[in-house]
Structures are given as C-alpha cells and as structure tokens.
Amino acid sequence: MNLFRRKHWLLTALGVSVLAVSVHADNFSPGSKVNVLRQYDLTDMSLLTTVNWTVSPGTSLGTPYAPIDGGHTLTQNAGSTDWAQNWGYIDITLPAAVSISSIYTAFHDHPPAQFRVLGSATGFTFNNTTDVLVDWTAGSGRLSKTYDLTSNTTVQYLRLEYSGTLVSQYFQLSEIMAFAANPTAIGLADGYNIMANKLSTPIVAKSGWQDAEPNNVFNTDSFGYLRPLNGDNTSYFIKDLGEVITLCAGSYSFFHGQGWDNTTIQVTTKDWETATDADWKTIFLADAVSGGHVFQFAPIDARYIRVTHNGAATGALTSLEFFAAPPVPEPVTLSLLTLGGLTMLRRRK
C-alpha cells in the first residue's frame, strides 16, 4: 500500500459544492516506538526540539544536542574531581505538548550517581510530586533502560537531572527518548523517524557484517549497532519497508569516534530480487562517514532500502533513520480549487 491514500471531500463555497481530491499521509501503526523528542521541519530538516544545559560551576559541557540525536554520540560533561559535587540537568522543549507513555535513557561508561526525569505541559517549574516521570534512580556502569510511566502523561517540557558522578569526574549521557502514548494519532509525514513504524519488517538480504542483525540500527536501543567484517570488503543489507513510501531525508549516527569508508544508500520500488542496477536510485553517497548527520534528497518512492559499505573501516553504526515526504495536492485538487475560487469571484461580481 502506498504511503498516501486518497480521500474525497466536498469544498463548499457560497452554496456551490466542488468535488476535490486531497492526499494525506498514513499514521503510525499501534505499538510504534515514536520518539517525540526528535521531530524535524521537513522543509529544511531543522530540529524542532530545543535543548538547554545547566551544570555545576567549573564543569566543561560536552556536545549539547547529542542526547537527542537518535544514536550513540554522547554528551560528556567534565566536572570536579570531588565526584559528589557534580550535578547538572538538560532541559528539552518540544514544539507542542504530546502524550507520552515511557522514557528511555542510556548512559555510557561514566554514569551519574543518581538521576531523575521530570515532565510538564506548562513550563520548567516542576512539582516534585506530580511532575516526576522517573524518580531518583541509581546509575550503574553502561546502562540503557526504558521506564514505563504509571500513566500516560502530557508534556512539552522535559528535564533529565543528575546528582553526582559514579566512576570519575565525567558524566556521559548517550540518549534520552520519550515515546508517544498514541502513535496512531501521529502522521508518518509529521517529521518523525518512520522506521519506528518498520521495526518488524524484514531484512531480505545481507552479507559481510560482523553482527547478525542489521535491524539493530533501526531499533530504539542506542547500544545496538552494526559493524562490517574486518578487512577490505563489501558489506550490504536490504531492508523491506513493507509498502511504498515517499522519502525525503535520512540520518545516521555512529558509535562515539567511529565511522565507515565509502558508503552508499539506495532505494527502489522494484522487487529486490529482480531489480537491476538502474532500478536502484542513490539517495546518499560519501567517501567517509562518521559521527551523526542528517541528509536530504529529492522526494522519492521507496519499497526497499539498500545500504552498502566498501572499505576496511569497521566502525559501529548505531542508528539509521528515514523521514517521509509531506503530502502534496494532486493536480486535480489544485485545478478544482482554482475553479472554485473563480466561481466565488464570479458570483461576488
């Protein structure tokens, strides 16, 4: 089924009904893990979520936006050698209030002594009883975990707060996510990662990887990853989206400090087993990739995605995301809307 389905509606103007056709996006399916902390404006792929850090005096702040980049790049704050005196918090503002059902956090090798997560729909003045989403929790080495909330909670303002550092003066936060309570109310073309809707669709072909499951890069665990085999070789996999979707952008993220050599991402609407080289359309090509990056391309229909790596690099890819193009009116819609406008002007005269 195509991403866009057709819907007939009546445009009524001054008593005149005009039959028109519009196109709108399907919504996420039930059970999709839609991370509402990562929403983009699809016109320029600017992140709509904003982040602000506050840290203890003398602390050197790391990369501010790393904890909401969808991958494993991290924020490392360097604080006092008196570990107990280190503290800080990250404030996250969403573009609009949304109901969430769970929180995910991932700390790297330098976790906090303890942390908590607060959320509110009205601002960053929190009630220490009603606005506590995850109560004070002890850190313990490299830790990633999803915390189910006691009830669905509407938030626009989130704060992850930490007190003390556990194994050194460093604090490392890899990721924080918040998952929508009602994904079926969110459109696939609303600027969220559509792969949250494709966690169960198969990898139909793969070769040349150290790790058994390429789907690791599409799940919501920032410690999941995919590495090419050692040596100068070609590695690839093909992901079936299960339907044809119009894509317009993507993003990738690697384990901190790692990357790949020559990397190509292609798509096709043809059957992957019979598709020719000409049927595979390139949407991303780079001699070397590392860190995290968002890339745009002209809207293109895709049923299958093929990712290919050529080279000796064996870095761990931790996240690969894609975004659906916003719907556009069909020509018949624009023509009929113009006709309706002319009819109104004629009657007004």
Image: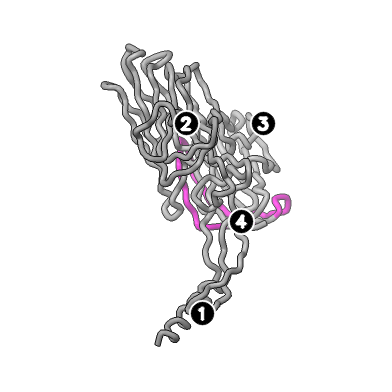
Circle on res. 15: 1
- Residue density around tag 4, few if under 14, some if 14–19, many if 20 or more, within 10 Å: many
Left or right: residue 91 versus residue 57 is: right
Left or right: residue 71 versus residue 7 is: left
Q: Is residue 292 magenta?
A: yes
Residue bounds of the magenta highlight:
271-300
Image point 55% across, 77% down: which residue? Answer: 18
Q: Quadrant of the C terminus?
A: bottom left
Circle on res. 3: 4
Give the CA distance from mark 4 to mark 3: 30 Å
Residue 339, relative to residue 242: is it above or below? below
Identify the mark nearer the N-term, 1 or 4: 4
Circle on res. 175: 2
Quarter occupied by residue 110: top left
Q: Nearer the viewer, mark 1 or mark 2?
A: 1
Name which residue type carries label 4. Leu
Please tell me whether mark 2 sits on a helix, a strand or a loop: strand
In front of the other: 322 or 120: 120
Q: Is residue 231 visible?
A: yes
Image point 41% across, 53% down: which residue? Answer: 44
Name which residue type carries label 1. Gly
Residue 30: x and y in percent read: 63, 44
Give the CA distance from mark 1 to mark 4: 34 Å
Identify the mark nearer the N-term, 1 or 2: 1
Identify the residue under disc 3.
212
Identify the mark nearer the N-term, 3 or 2: 2
